[in-house]
Amino acid sequence: MDGDKQVALVSGASRGLGAQMARRLHAGGFRVAIADIDLDGAIALAGELDASGATALALKLDVRSKDDFTAAHQLLSSRWGGVQVLVNNAGQSKIGALMDITAEEFDAVVAVNLKGVFLACQVFGQAFARQGYGRIVNIASLAGQTGGTATGAHYAAAKGGVLTLTKVFARELAPDGVVVNAISPGPLDLPIVHQTVPADKLAAITQAIPTRSLGDAGFIADMVLLLASPQAAMTTGACWDANGGLLMR
């Protein structure tokens, strides 16, 4: 596979969608850095993928810190000779009535979901440009395209900003062999969804989707693998939708 010997960092990768992405990249031949603020979870997944540490590594990463991204890149460059792929998956989904969201709550959600993407693209984008090659995949959300119906305005606004940052960095980095794309999932069939959404409400949500089904997280991981490949050179600044027909364009 094209990922053989390449290095990919996935943020928010200790569980859920991020873990699916890390598993798929690893199976595709990538050496994978599982980066998460939850270091114990990251260590557990890295051990599951490769207990020897030769092809899977856990990193503690707070996406709100530019220094953390710089340190992560330096560590991976020292250990594996460089990084070729960045997947900005870390996020924090929040629900809140529009007029009740406090300034502090707004700042906290934007810091994780939007500022984190900006900092990561700055640090890794510059490094990728210097080496003349790189793939960045930003995980957006349908909420950022429609304004959100099941999420808070702070989350929807941040994810809308991710789509704009994707275009900005794609334009800036394209001449240097770096492509930047976004994936925008709708509601996904993940354990966390079933744990947090009451069954009757989840059934209503599913019925409102034209395909009458929640999204497959494994397919989102497949999309990441495709956008991480060398063959993705002509796809940049794009948003790939996977929402069951909730948004058609």
Image (cartoon, grey):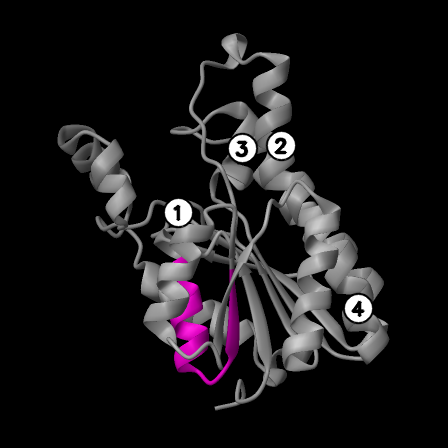
The residue lying at 48 percent from left, 25 percent from top is 152
- Name the residue carrying label 1: 186
User: Which residue is disc 4 drawn over?
Assistant: 127
Magenta-tinted stretch = 18-34
Q: CA distance from mark 4 to mark 3?
A: 29 Å
Front-lying residue, 245 or 243: 243
Disc 3 and disc 2: Cα gap in Å?
A: 10 Å
SS at badge 3: helix
Dot 1 or dot 4, earlier in sequence = 4
Give the quarter of the image for residue 49: bottom left
Task: Write down the quadrant of residue 170 in the picture.
Answer: bottom right
| Callout 2: SS | helix
Residue depth check, mark 1 versus mark 4: number of the one nearer the observer: 4
Q: What is the secondary structure assignment of the residue under circle 1?
A: loop
Residue where numbered disc 2 is placed: 110
Place of residue 32 in the rendered image (x, y in percent of width and height, measured from the top left): 51, 72
Q: Which residue is mark 3?
A: 156
Q: Relative to 144, is 121 above or below?
A: below
Q: Does 43 sit left or right of 127 as displayed?
A: left
Residue 124 point in image, percent of width and height: 73, 63
Q: Position of residue 63 (x, y in %)?
A: 62, 45
Q: Amino acid at mark 1?
A: Gly
Q: Is residue 25 magenta?
A: yes
Identify the residue shown where x is 78% and y is 55%. 122
Give the foreground label among 3 and 2. 2
Does residue 2 appear left or right of residue 104 in this picture?
Answer: left
Front-most of 237 and 2? Answer: 2
Q: Amino acid at mark 4?
A: Ala
- Whether residue 14 is visible here, answered yes or no, is no
Q: Quadrant of residue 134?
A: bottom right
Mark 1 or mark 2, whichever is nearer to me: 2
Between marks 2 and 4 in the image, the one whose residue lies nearer the viewer: 4
